[in-house]
Image (cartoon, grey):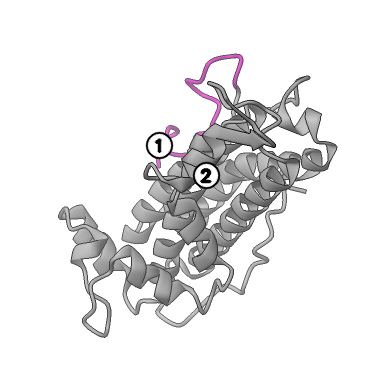
């Protein structure tokens, strides 16, 4: 394993944005305006840092050997880190038009991690991806294409909270009624709008729900990564023990 693959996450990044440094809450941001957001935002930011610790742990298992599922795990964790970091930035900047689709993308990662964790041979999925096969072109054990709808259906028993959140956030991916509601405010006989979105348009409760959903999706994604960590390099059906899915070192 090269030093680059075991990177702590700080190398090559601008000095003003080191990966392990907590993102401060500046005056005027959403978490400053709504005090109830401060703790959940801080926790999500700690999850951002925990990506680095968890990836290092997984890469070090079994003497640092790399298996096919490691390729998928690394891509998921790299994507997740970027999404979590971006959601924190979007919440700070009242950017709901970007934050909601970012949450939707994290759910997209979670349902795929859920599927791969429950198939008999995860290597087959990774091999198909390496050949350029999209998930929607693959089929499950029942012969059904792995469309987004099918992946959500398969994930629902393990993540019952997910389907309604997925549906709601999908409305922010394509221009829809959600955007119309956010763009125009009606008070009595007055109608108003503005660009960018005015901070007082979106209530703190909505930002809190978004942070909580992003946190839940990220922690449950970590659970699947830790599941792989416990099984990596062992014969099928064996495990080193079920680790706690709660992030530990930098998240608490």
Q: Within the image, what quadrant is residue 51 found in?
A: top right
Whether residue 31 is situated above or below residue 169 in the rendered picture: above
The mark tally for this picture is 2
Tell me: 95 left or right of 154.
right
Q: Position of residue 153 (x, y in %)?
A: 41, 75
Residue nearer the viewer, 30 or 89: 30
Q: Residue at x 74, y 25 (%)?
A: 24
Q: Position of residue 159 (x, y in %)?
A: 55, 71
Residue at the far right in the pictured view: 35
Q: Quadrant of the N terminus?
A: top left
Q: Secondary structure at mark 2?
A: helix
Q: Residue at x 26, y 62 (%)?
A: 135
Spatial CA distance of label 1 from label 2 is 36 Å
The numbered disc on residue 100 is 2
Tell me: 197 left or right of 247.
left
Q: Position of residue 182 (x, y in %)?
A: 55, 37
Q: From where the camera sits, is residue 1 visible?
A: yes
Q: From where the camera sits, is residue 59 visible?
A: no
Q: Which residue is mark 1?
A: 2
The numbered disc on residue 192 is none
Q: Secondary structure at mark 1?
A: loop
Q: Magenta segment, which residues?
A: 1-17
> Does 188 lie within the magenta span?
no
Circle 2 crowding by C-alpha within 10 Å: few under 14, some 14–19, many from 20:
many
Residue at the far left in the pictured view: 131
């Amino acid at each position: 394993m090269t030093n680059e693959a075991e990177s702590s996450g700080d190398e090559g990044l601008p000095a003003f944005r080191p990966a392990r440094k907590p993102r401060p809450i500046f005056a005027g941001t959403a978490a400053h305006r709504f005090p109830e957001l401060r703790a959940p935002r801080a926790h999500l930011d700690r999850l951002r840092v925990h990506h680095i610790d968890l990836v290092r742990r997984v890469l070090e298992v079994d003497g640092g050997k790399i298996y096919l599922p490691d390729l998928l795990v690394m891509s998921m964790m790299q994507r997740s880190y970027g999404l979590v970091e971006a959601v924190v930035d979007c919440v700070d900047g009242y950017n709901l038009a970007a934050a909601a689709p970012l949450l939707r993308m994290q759910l997209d990662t979670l349902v795929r991690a859920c599927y791969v964790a429950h198939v008999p041979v995860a290597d087959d999925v990774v091999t198909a991806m390496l050949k350029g096969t999209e998930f929607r072109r693959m089929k499950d054990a029942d012969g059904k294409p792995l469309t987004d709808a099918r992946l959500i259906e398969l994930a629902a028993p393990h993540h019952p909270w997910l389907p309604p959140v997925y549906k709601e956030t999908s409305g922010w991916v394509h221009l829809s009624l959600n955007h119309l509601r956010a763009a125009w405010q009606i008070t009595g006989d007055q109608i108003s709008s503005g660009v960018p979105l005015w901070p007082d348009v979106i209530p703190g409760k909505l930002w809190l729900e978004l942070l909580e959903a992003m946190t839940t999706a990220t922690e449950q994604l970590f659970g699947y990564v830790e599941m792989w960590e416990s099984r990596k390099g062992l014969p099928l059906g064996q495990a080193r023990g079920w680790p706690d899915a709660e992030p530990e070192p930098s998240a608490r």
